[in-house]
């Protein structure tokens, strides 16, 4: 069974206290995955992307929901390490060498770090759940959350 790796767009939908229709549908799909024993993974870089904005805007309820979601038994938190960051640097460089950068050259490019976390820590047995597949290298398995069906 493939692990589902959440990107920031999805984590934001799932933890926003003002849940939209889209957020509710995303949460329902996530629950189906959890009920199917599908591993749900939250990369540290994804937590960072959501957390920094919640902190900047002083959104305490959002931070509580994020912390609660991450600490739940339903998800596994993936920390960043040196191997991940070196893989991310390689992915970033390759994307630019091939003329397909997903972010500005001066940007940190969190999606490359996310891709590297999935590659290194899931050994290619994953799909990244995202709202924008174009942000990821073509050889990295990514799909919109609506297309990911529990096995």
Image: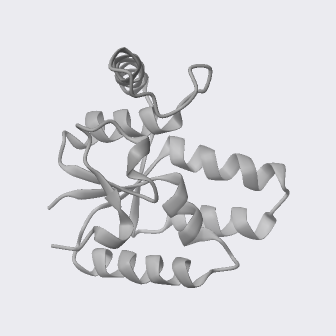
At which x and y percent is residue 63?
71, 62
| Image-quadrant location for residue 5 | bottom left
Residue 119 horizontal side relative to residue 134, left or right = left
Q: Is residue 11 above or below residue 141?
A: below
Residue 94 horizontal side relative to residue 82, left or right = left
At which x and y percent is residue 44?
50, 43
Q: Nearer the viewer, residue 145 or 60?
A: 145
Q: Is residue 35 above or below residue 41?
A: below
Residue lying furthest front: 99
Q: Nearer the viewer, residue 105 or 119?
A: 105
Q: How is the image coloured?
A: one colour
Residue lying furthest right: 58
Q: Which residue is at 54% across, 71% downward?
A: 14
Q: How many tags in the picture? A: 0
At which x and y percent is residue 3?
25, 57
Q: Nearer the viewer, residue 15 or 77?
A: 15
Q: Is residue 17 above or below residue 6?
A: below
| Image-quadrant location for residue 85 | top left
Q: Nearer the viewer, residue 23 or 102?
A: 102
Q: Which residue is at 52% across, 41% downward?
A: 45
| Image-quadrant location for residue 21 | bottom right
At which x and y percent is residue 50?
63, 52
Rendered-image quadrant of the N terminus = bottom left
Residue 147 horizontal side relative to residue 106, left or right = left
Rendered-image quadrant of the C terminus = bottom left
Q: Is residue 1 above or below residue 121?
A: below
Q: Which residue is at 38% across, 18% downward?
A: 86
């Amino acid at each position: 069974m493939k692990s589902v790796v959440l990107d920031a767009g999805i984590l934001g939908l799932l933890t926003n206290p003002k849940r939209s229709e889209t957020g509710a549908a995303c949460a329902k799909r996530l629950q189906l995955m959890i009920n199917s024993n599908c591993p749900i993974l939250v990369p540290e870089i994804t937590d960072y992307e959501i957390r920094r904005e919640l902190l900047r805007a002083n959104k305490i309820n959002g931070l509580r929901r994020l912390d609660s979601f991450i600490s739940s038994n339903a998800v596994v938190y993936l920390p960043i390490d040196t191997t991940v960051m070196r893989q991310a640097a390689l992915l970033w460089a390759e994307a630019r060498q091939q003329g397909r950068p997903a972010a500005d050259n001066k940007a940190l490019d969190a999606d490359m770090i996310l891709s590297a976390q999935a590659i290194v820590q899931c050994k290619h047995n994953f799909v990244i759940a995202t709202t924008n597949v174009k942000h990821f290298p073509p050889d990295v398995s990514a799909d919109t959350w609506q297309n990911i069906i529990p096995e």
